[in-house]
Image (cartoon, grey):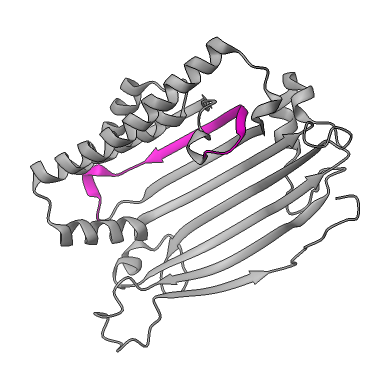
């Protein structure tokens, strides 16, 4: 019961701080069932205020968030975390027309968010104290959850646009990711073999990265001028293994990576006399593209 409470409180506080149209009651009910599916979420304008930078989120949308948590069998059940279509458009604060009423609302939300972060820490400490959790048991459970977790992230596009700093030379800088997956496997890198996976103390993961890129565009029209097509513009601006958006000027990538990761959480107790490293990574990258054009 305690872990359900912790997870429910964490998600409600964290998501509530950043999501504008979150249904807290529905989220809590879904969590108790172990299966959360949230779609078409709007990101609050204040989401980036914690960075204390002169920027403002003009548009933010999360297409889908899926969490599958097997509360009835946390030791052996697979945990799924899936994020799809996260689009963020960031602009300088000076680029936003001043609205006194809106600004007052934003400042109030920022204060509420700060108070919520403090309250979240206090509530979690109280829950742990009341339930008298054993620290070693929590540590083992967290390690098991890391071994069990499956992460899938698709279609991420974060973009910063500026047409005020250099009035004659508007530009946009962005980060895109087509697909990222992290899957659990055995020590022979086999997936879908949970029995053998649990028999070994180390954590083995297979990682796939498709279409990781950073761009600096100096010629393409800015998204903020075509607000009615935000979703299409963000989606079509994401590079894949066989597609590069026309006109995009890349600083990095797009790159594609396949990797094998081995984690050894307790090297002092694994019996190898520290011969097994704590972190081992084998990465295969087809091409590494890095460039800077004169006009950038």
Residue 80 position (above or below residue 222): below
Q: Residue at x 41, y 46 (%)?
A: 80
Residue 146, percent from left and from top: 35, 58
Residue placed most toward the observer, 89 or 157 = 89
Residue 30, percent from left and from top: 32, 29
Q: Residue at x 44, y 37 (%)?
A: 66
Residue 176 position (above or below residue 201): above
In this rendering, does residue 1 appear at all?
Answer: no
Of all residues, the one furthest to the top in this rendering is: 101
Residue 280, percent from left and from top: 47, 76
In this rendering, does residue 182 appear at all?
Answer: yes
Q: Total label count?
A: 0
Residue 63 in the magenta stretch? The answer is yes
Q: Which residue is drawn at 68% across and 38% down?
A: 159
Residue 243, percent from left and from top: 79, 48
Which quarter of the image is occupied by the N terminus? Answer: top left
Snapshot quadrant of residue 38 = top left
Say left or right for 195 vs 152: left
Say left or right for 123 vs 42: left
Say left or right for 217 vs 27: right
Snapshot quadrant of residue 287 = bottom right
Residue 53 in the magenta stretch? The answer is yes
Residue placed most toward the observer, 110 or 208 = 110
Snapshot quadrant of residue 169 = top right
Residue placed most toward the observer, 219 or 285 = 219
Residue 8 position (above or below residue 101): below
Residue 21 position (above or below residue 185): above
Magenta-tinted stretch: 52-75
């Amino acid at each position: 019961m305690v872990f359900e409470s912790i997870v429910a409180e964490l998600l409600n506080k964290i998501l509530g701080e950043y999501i504008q149209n979150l249904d807290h009651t529905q989220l809590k009910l879904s969590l108790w069932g172990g299966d959360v599916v949230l779609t078409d979420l709007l990101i609050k304008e204040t989401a980036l205020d914690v960075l204390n930078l002169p920027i403002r989120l003009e548009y933010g949308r999360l297409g889908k968030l899926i969490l599958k948590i097997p509360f009835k069998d946390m030791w052996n059940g697979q945990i799924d975390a899936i994020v799809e279509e996260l689009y963020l458009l960031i602009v300088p604060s000076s680029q936003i027309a001043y609205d006194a009423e809106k600004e007052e609302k934003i400042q109030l939300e920022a204060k509420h968010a700060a108070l919520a972060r403090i309250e979240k820490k206090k509530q979690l400490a109280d829950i742990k104290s009341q339930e008298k959790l054993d620290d070693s048991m929590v540590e083992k459970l967290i390690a098991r959850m890391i071994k069990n977790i499956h992460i899938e992230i698709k279609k991420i596009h974060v973009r910063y646009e500026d047409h005020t700093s250099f009035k004659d030379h508007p530009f946009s800088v962005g980060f895109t990711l087509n697909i990222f997956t992290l899957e659990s496997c055995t020590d022979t890198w086999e997936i879908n073999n949970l029995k053998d996976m649990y028999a070994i103390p180390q954590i083995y993961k297979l990682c796939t990265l498709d279409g990781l890129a950073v761009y600096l565009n100096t010629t393409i029209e800015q998204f903020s001028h075509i607000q009615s097509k935000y979703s299409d513009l963000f989606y079509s601006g994401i590079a894949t293994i066989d597609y590069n958006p026309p006109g995009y000027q890349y600083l990095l990538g797009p790159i594609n990576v396949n990797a094998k990761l081995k984690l050894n959480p307790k090297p002092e107790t694994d019996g190898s006399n520290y011969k097994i490293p704590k972190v081992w990574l084998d990465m295969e990258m087809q091409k590494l593209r890095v460039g800077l054009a004169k006009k950038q």
